[in-house]
Image: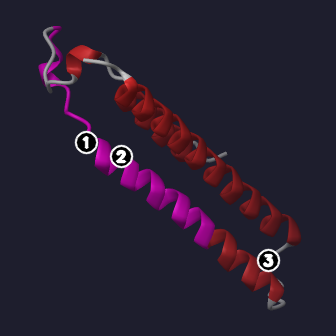
Amino acid sequence: MDLSNANSVVSLMNSVLAPASAVGGSTASGDAGKPSVDFGSVLKSSLDRVDASQQKAEAISRSFEMGNNDVDLHDVMLSLQKANIDMQTAVQVRNKLVSAYQSIMSMSI
């Protein structure tokens, strides 16, 4: 089982759910040694992984359709399901981010 996608989603959610004290870029609790995580780069790398999984599934599917004997039907189905799960995860993360943005924008100052 490939856990790289799950780890990237967890790191994305951790960066979104960071404590309010870390918004300024530094915290008073001695986290100065930690490297900062750029939200944009984490989001881009996660979307790149989703895209790569979609392209891999399409390539395996196309290879099977062309009659390649090296590709089994179960490999095609597994890659398509993995790509589908990756896409569903990305959509759910997007939905949570949009919901968080809407909650923030509806707050009064």
Inspect the image, locate mark 1, and give the three-letter code of the amino acid beneath it: Asp
Which segment did they paint magenta? 29-55
Kindly identify the residue that appears in the image at 27 percent across and 16 percent down. 20
Q: Position of residue 95 (x, y in %)?
A: 55, 40
Kindly identify the residue that appears in the image at 53 percent across and 65 percent down. 51
Q: Is residue 43 left or right of residue 51?
A: left
Decide which of 26, 93 is in the foreground and name it.
93
Q: CA distance from mark 2 to mark 3?
A: 33 Å
Contact check, label 2 and label 3, Cβ < 8 Å: no
Total count of labels:
3
Q: Is residue 99 visible?
A: yes
Kindly identify the residue that appears in the image at 59 percent across and 41 percent down. 92
Inspect the image, locate mark 3, and give the three-letter code of the amino acid beneath it: Val
Q: Is residue 105 left or right of residue 9?
A: left
- Picture quadrant of residue 63: bottom right
Kindly identify the residue that appears in the image at 59 percent across and 72 percent down. 55
Contact check, label 1 and label 2, Cβ < 8 Å: yes
Q: Residue beneath label 1, please?
A: 38
